[in-house]
Amino acid sequence: MRQRLSDALYGLGWATVKRLPEPAAMALGRRIADTAWRRRGPAVRRLEANYARVVPDASPARLRALSRAGMRSYLRYWIESFRLPVWDEARIRNCFHVADFHLVKETLAQGRGVVLALPHSGNWDVAGAWLVTELRIPLTTVAERLKPETLYDRFVAYREGLGMEVVPHTGGSAFGILSRRLRKGGVVALVADRDLSASGVEVTFFGEPTRMPAGPALLAQQTGAVLFPVELWYDETTVIKGRVHPAVEPPAEGTRAEKTAAMTQQLADSFAAGIARHPHDWHMLQRLWLSDLEPRPGEPGAAPRKERAA
């Protein structure tokens, strides 16, 4: 029942919000964000706890202000995403400004593939639509399989409508498909600040251990593609900002696992620097750090423990 309700609500969002005048749609998003923030449910409390790692010297009042701004930023992402299918090409081009994109263009001109790795910040769907419009080539990405299946199908159809190729995260074929696209000189974009595979690389992130996916580093090593960290944030207008950071290169020495660990830590450091500059635009409403997660099977204490409340 809950899954069907989620599917219906997302469907209502895509069907209704895109028909509203933009000021009315954005005002609606702010009202929803503020209502959720005042209710202080688990997602808001988790967001606030995550911000406490990002801004460790923040007072309780500062954290509350950050979580309110964070919820508004998160709902802005959803309102923009619901409306994105009806934006014309000119609107997409004008709403996203990215610095140092020449790094991507120069790499593609050399015939090499590009892996863009980014955290859950700003609006990665708008950035992806802009990239497809700018480069005139498909962008391949990975989507987490959602339940019910109809909801996952909505997200796939939505992103494919923006010119993206969407590969399911599960099923075992994603890595092979991404590798083939990169060997042909394509672009792969991966949201890479949260491990969904239970086999991620342990990194230090804001001074504490967590796991991040190994995929970006492994793809770069296996295919010869260039791995770029990307930073996204909002400014005070309708513009979304971005920056492509210098490439993360494989170390000259070490095993594949050692190189992957070093590259993933470099990504984590780049993500952390960007998130620290714009913390309220980081939409991490889930548990992330290992100290917040339930132990995995086989780890000490896994059997008797239950997940802690947010």
Image (cartoon, rainbow, N blue to C red):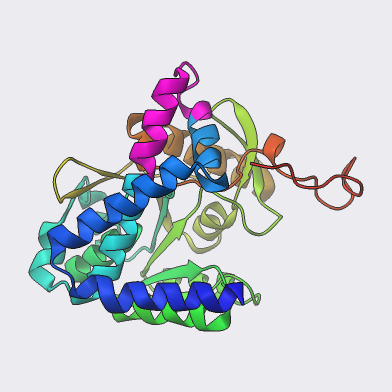
Which residue shows up at 26% across the image and 50% down it?
A: 103
Q: Is residue 68 above or below residue 136?
A: above
Which residue shows up at 37% across the image and 41% down it?
A: 70
On the rendered structure, is 198 left or right of 31? right
Which residue shows up at 68% across the image and 38% down it?
A: 292
Image-quadrant location for residue 171: bottom right
Could one spot residue 230 in this view of the protein? no
Region of the chain picked out in magenta, as a range: 52-71
Q: Does the magenta portion include 109?
A: no
For the residue pair 85 and 197, the one nearer the viewer reads as 85
Residue 192: image x %, image y %?
A: 50, 52
Q: Does the magenta portion include 61?
A: yes
On the rendered structure, is 204 left or right of 275? right
Position of the C terminus by quadrant: top right
How many marks can you see?
Answer: 0
Could one spot residue 130 in this view of the protein? yes
Position of the N terminus by quadrant: bottom right
Residue 283: image x %, image y %?
A: 43, 47
* Secondary structure mostly taken by the magenta-highlighted segment of the chain: helix
Which residue shows up at 44% across the image and 68% down it?
A: 141
On the rendered structure, is 26 left or right of 1? left
Residue 125: image x %, image y %?
A: 32, 63
Image-quadrant location for residue 107: bottom left
Q: Is residue 186 above or below residue 204?
A: below
On the rendered structure, is 155 left or right of 204? left
Residue 152: image x %, image y %?
A: 51, 77
